[in-house]
């Protein structure tokens, strides 16, 4: 009966909510022209040729807010994380076809956000850039304000080393800074599920008022606890956000400009909370780079 | 004729005698449908082969089984029909990456259409990545052509604005030849989608729309249901041999691909999608366009009420 009620409610709300017409003529601002200097900079990050056999095929393509033309359906997430420009280039040779995509995200934390949104803790991570992983046909990594994605087609045994070589070239070109955003240091390391940290620009835990936020998973006796830092404007804003959040099985507390939420906390949460307090206490983490 | 409503169009052309034969044969097919034929069938492979030939064989056998369980392709396709088969060829991805429909599922549907008497089978999609690369890389072009289908890239000039009278899409550009085909068979892959949680049958029909499709994202669920309500595919097939469970719709990392070894087929596109949602770990009511499709009378979310025919192959 209860399920039937929920289904009826969903159906009714789906039809009763007024809909706004989407028109083919609807004005859509043309994408901002990507400055020539940005295009030059992005292309310069890519190799002119991988080796004597594998060379660029066609001309580089650039996108910004028109990213949907390249990846309709997948573009919105990149735009939500603040994509400023993107270059796509193809390479061919030696029985391989390689696609190289470099996304410039404006700020390192935005780049981390989109990178982390697409990675899973169980991937095969490799030492490249700030963090990266590879598979038979892909190699994706994060460095500075860039999210770099390579995909290769052909013999995976041949493709993997080529992708890695290209990725290392790009990493060198980006520069020596290979650190993840320092604000990720808010997460205590003990019991942290490796590579589970995320940065959410929209609706963390389903709530817009918690955005932006950092989130990570912890494992206590095989059970998952989610720790979230809502990055508030100041201490007052953090306290206000606390009043808006209601839910079972969670611990919520404000610490300076952070609202901390532990979902499904461990039976004895004291050690975790103490560790969080210690990390927040590291002023070097908290202050200047918090939103960058 | 710049603005066409699908029903008006079909009525007009039928009156003009252009579709008389097709409509008559459609009627015959409907009358010939056994009353016991189910509206939904689910075929599952007992094993999960890993060799490419084994997976291809699995896809072919599951597809045949799922259609047979519905009463066979002759329930949907009649002699002389022009059939538009709409797979997902949206991405420059290999079949292993599960971002596009399994090519052996598509080729089997093409074979079945011809066996049922189809005059021509057309296979195409409005790819998101380069069509040339997507058609080739997905393996669909080669497989469908071998099966006798006409596989071609969409011609921008053939998108025509049509009066859809939808909830949010009053009119939009759709591919004229697909709308005019005697039969539309939707052959989607089950995969994760970053915006609407799941790409299923109704989502796949977006590939017959032209124009600035990113505008659909203002109200994606309503847009998808508008398109599905307008196009009304005769048959919807879901390929869940391999399923992309994360980072859709593009994917790429094999670590995100899981085997489900399942093909779903049905005449109720909402019910098909409702079951498809469960293959990704969702409840039907988690998927907005499934909920809205049911609310707007396209079908039922309660797929179990259709007593789906389950087959182990």
Image: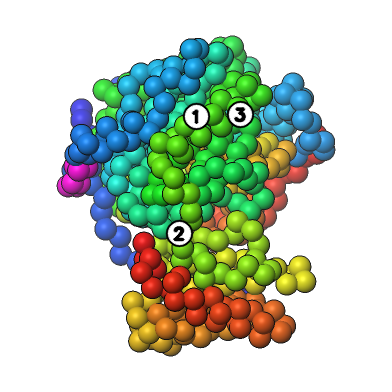
Q: Label 3 marks which chain's residue?
A: A
Q: Residues within 10 Å of mark 2 (few under 14, many from 20)?
A: many
Q: Which residue is mark 1?
A: A166
Q: Residue at x 47, y 44 (%)?
A: B203
Q: Which residue is mark 3?
A: A160
Q: Residue at x 26, y 22 (%)?
A: B157
Q: Is residue A144 left or right of residue B56?
A: left
Q: Which residue is mark 2?
A: A181
Q: Is residue A205 left or right of residue B156?
A: right
Q: From this view, report whether residue B194 is shown above or below residue B267.
A: below
Q: Label 2 marks which chain's residue?
A: A
Task: Determine the residue located farthest toward the front in the rendered image.
Answer: A176
Name the one closer to the observer, B133 or B18. B133
- The residues colored magenta run A26-32
Question: Which callout, 3 or 2, points to the residue nearer the camera?
Answer: 2
Is A30 part of what is drawn in magenta? yes
| Residue A73 in picture, x, y percent from top left | 41, 44
Is A267 part of what is drawn in magenta? no
The disc, 3 or 2, on the residue closer to the chain's N-terminal end is 3
Disc 2 to disc 1, C-alpha distance: 24 Å
| Callouts 2 and 1 in the same chain | yes
Q: From this view, report whether residue B211 is shown above or below residue B16.
A: below
Q: Residues within 10 Å of mark 1 (few under 14, many from 20)?
A: many
Q: Label 1 marks which chain's residue?
A: A
Q: From this view, report whether residue B246 is shown above or below residue B155.
A: below
Q: Are marks 3 and 2 in contact (CB under 8 Å)?
A: no
State the predominant SS element of the stretch in magenta. Answer: loop
Question: Dividing the picture into quarters, in which one does residue B44 lie?
Answer: top right
| Residue B126 in picture, x, y percent from top left | 40, 30
Q: Which mark is residue B47?
A: none
Q: Let me know if residue A180 appears in the view.
A: yes
Q: Is residue A264 left or right of residue A61?
A: right
């Amino acid at each position: 009966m209860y399920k039937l009620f929920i289904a009826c409610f969903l159906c009714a709300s789906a039809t009763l909510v007024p809909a706004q017409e989407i028109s083919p003529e609807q004005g859509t601002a043309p994408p901002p022209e990507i400055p020539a200097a940005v295009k030059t900079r992005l292309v310069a990050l890519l190799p002119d040729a991988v080796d004597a056999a594998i060379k660029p095929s066609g001309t580089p393509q650039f996108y910004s807010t028109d990213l949907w033309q390249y990846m309709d359906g997948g573009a919105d997430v990149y735009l939500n994380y603040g994509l400023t420009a993107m270059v796509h280039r193809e390479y061919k040779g030696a029985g391989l076809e390689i696609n190289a995509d470099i996304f410039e995200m404006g700020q390192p934390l935005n780049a981390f956000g989109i990178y982390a949104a697409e990675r899973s803790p169980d991937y095969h991570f490799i030492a490249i850039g700030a963090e990266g992983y590879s598979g038979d046909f892909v190699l994706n990594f994060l460095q500075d304000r860039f999210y770099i994605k390579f995909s290769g087609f052909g013999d995976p045994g041949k493709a993997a080393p080529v992708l890695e070589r290209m990725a290392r070239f790009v990493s060198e070109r980006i520069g020596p800074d290979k650190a993840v955003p320092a604000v990720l240091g808010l997460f205590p390391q003990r019991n942290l599920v490796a590579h589970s940290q995320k940065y959410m620009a929209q609706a963390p835990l389903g709530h817009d008022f918690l955005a932006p936020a950092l989130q990570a998973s912890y494992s206590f006796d095989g059970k998952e606890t989610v720790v979230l830092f809502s990055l508030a404007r100041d201490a007052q804003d953090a306290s206000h956000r606390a009043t808006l959040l209601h839910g079972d099985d969670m611990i919520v507390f404000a610490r300076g400009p952070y609202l901390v939420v532990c979902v499904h906390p461990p039976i004895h949460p004291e050690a975790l909370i103490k560790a969080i307090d210690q990390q927040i206490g590291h002023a070097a983490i908290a202050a200047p780079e918090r939103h960058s | 004729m710049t603005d066409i409503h699908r029903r008006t169009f079909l009525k007009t052309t039928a009156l003009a005698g252009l579709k008389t034969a097709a409509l008559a044969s459609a009627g015959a097919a409907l009358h010939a449908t056994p009353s016991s034929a189910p509206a939904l069938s689910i075929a599952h492979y007992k094993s999960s082969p890993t060799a490419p030939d084994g997976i291809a064989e699995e896809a072919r056998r599951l597809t045949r089984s799922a259609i047979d369980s519905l009463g066979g392709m002759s329930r949907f396709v009649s002699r002389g029909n022009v059939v538009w088969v709409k797979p997902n060829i949206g991405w420059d991805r290999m079949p292993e990456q599960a971002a596009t429909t399994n090519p052996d599922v598509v080729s089997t549907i093409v074979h079945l259409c011809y066996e049922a008497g189809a005059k021509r089978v057309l296979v195409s999609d409005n790819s998101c990545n380069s069509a040339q690369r997507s058609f080739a890389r997905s393996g669909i072009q080669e497989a469908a052509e071998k099966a006798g289908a006409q596989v071609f890239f969409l011609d921008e000039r053939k998108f025509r604005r049509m009066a859809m009278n939808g909830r949010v899409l009053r009119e939009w550009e759709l591919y004229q030849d697909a709308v005019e085909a005697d039969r539309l068979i939707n052959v989607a892959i089950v995969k994760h989608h970053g915006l609407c949680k799941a790409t299923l049958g109704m989502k796949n029909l977006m590939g017959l729309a032209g124009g600035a499709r990113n505008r659909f994202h203002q109200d994606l669920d309503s847009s998808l249901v508008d398109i599905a309500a307008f196009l009304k595919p005769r048959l919807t097939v879901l390929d869940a041999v391999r399923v992309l469970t994360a980072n859709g719709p593009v994917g790429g990392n094999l670590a995100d691909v899981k085997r489900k070894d399942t093909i779903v087929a049905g005449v109720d596109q909402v019910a098909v999608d409702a079951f498809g949602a469960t293959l990704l770990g969702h409840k039907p009511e988690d998927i907005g366009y499934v909920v809205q499709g049911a609310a707007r009378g396209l079908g039922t979310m309660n797929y179990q009420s259709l007593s789906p025919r389950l087959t182990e192959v």
